[in-house]
Image: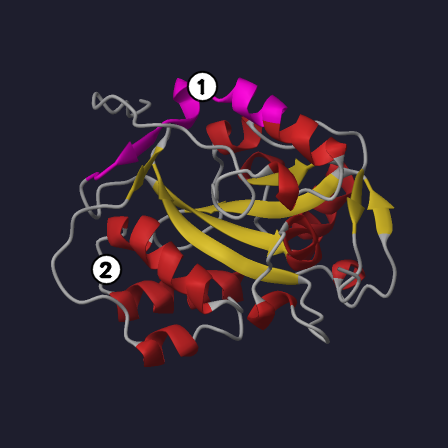
């Protein structure tokens, strides 16, 4: 049975890095603007964001792996830690997101301390932006039912559960691929991962991220809503690390 949340959704946002507000100046070209408008038009109750949900009350996780060169190229003022001169990140952890079968909680009300600087810094090898780490805790970690240390341990464990395909590592030039090829590469590299449990995201013709659905114990699982909202482009570009 699909779990519906009766609470009406708050505002819906389409964006780049985890729903960051879209600004026309942040896009490399008009293609990004058109893609953002399309994304806004496609927003529906199926993707509802329930602000202030009950911490720990969710159905599964989504591990989002962002293609860093696309993110960096899309920003007018990118984070120097992630996008500065000489940075050559490929896939990085965007976040581990508690999800409902339809919609997702965010910014849950919790008691206790925020992550310490040491806890934030400890995540920079896989989430190379202090601002991103803090944002992910505020928006998603607070809904996990875990304290900051345990949540970041779960993020690291989930990331360790997923192997990035060898063919998508260490790119030295831009590649043009289909979303289906990216999905198949991840499925082949990760036994137990099925097509219904992975979705490729794209913006403006570029690969944005790969989303992989996991149970609360971090086993691969299907996720109909996430899969439905996958990239519909026939081909996407993967800018090479360091090219932004």
Is 116 rendered above or below residue 239? below
**Badge 1 element:** loop
Left or right of 49? Residue 111 is left
Which segment did they paint magenta?
37-53
Q: Quadrant of residue 184?
A: top right
- Seen from the viewer's position, the closer of residues 128 and 235 is 128
- Seen from the viewer's position, the closer of residues 14 and 46 is 14
Query: Is 101 contained in the magenta span?
Result: no
Question: Which mark, by number, is residue 44?
Answer: 1
Is 26 rendered above or below residue 132? above
Residue 232, horizontal then vertical, whole percent: 70, 27
Could you tell me which quadrant the C terminus lies in? bottom right
Q: Residue at x 48, y 22 (%)?
A: 43
Q: Quadrant of residue 163?
A: bottom right
Residue 69 appearing in the image? yes
Residue neighbourhood size for the residue with mark 1, other residues' Cα within 10 Å, grouped as few (<14), some (14–19), many (≥20): few
Residue 162 appearing in the image? no
**Badge 2 element:** loop
Residue 96, horizontal then vertical, whole percent: 42, 53
Residue of label 2: 146
Residue 2, horizontal then vertical, whole percent: 33, 23
Tell me the mark number nearer the camera, choosing from 2 and 1: 1
- Distance between the alpha carbons at the discs numbered 2 and 1: 29 Å
Q: Residue at x 25, y 21 (%)?
A: 8
């Amino acid at each position: 049975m699909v779990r519906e949340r009766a609470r009406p959704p708050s505002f819906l946002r389409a964006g780049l890095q985890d729903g960051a507000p879209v600004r026309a100046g942040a896009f490399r070209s008009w293609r990004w603007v058109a893609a953002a408008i399309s994304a806004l038009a496609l927003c529906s109750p199926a993707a509802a964001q329930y602000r202030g949900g009950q911490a720990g009350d969710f159905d599964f996780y989504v591990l989002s792996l962002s293609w860093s060169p696309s993110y960096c190229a899309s920003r007018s003022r990118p984070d120097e830690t992630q996008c500065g001169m000489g940075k050559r990140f490929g896939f990085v952890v965007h976040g581990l997101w508690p999800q409902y079968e339809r919609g997702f909680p965010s910014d849950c009300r919790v008691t206790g301390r925020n992550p310490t600087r040491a806890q934030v810094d400890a995540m920079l090898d896989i989430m190379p932006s202090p601002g991103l780490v803090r944002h992910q805790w505020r928006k998603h970690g607070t809904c996990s039912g875990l304290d900051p240390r345990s949540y970041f341990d779960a993020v690291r464990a989930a990331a360790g559960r997923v192997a990035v395909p060898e063919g998508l590592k260490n790119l030295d030039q831009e590649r043009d691929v289909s979303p289906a090829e990216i999905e198949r590469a991840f499925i082949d590299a990760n036994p137990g991962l099925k097509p219904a449990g992975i979705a490729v995201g794209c913006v403006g013709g570029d690969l944005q991220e790969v989303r992989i659905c996991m149970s609360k114990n971090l086993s691969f699982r299907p996720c109909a809503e996430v899969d439905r909202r996958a990239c519909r482009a026939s081909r996407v570009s993967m800018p090479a690390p360091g090219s932004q």
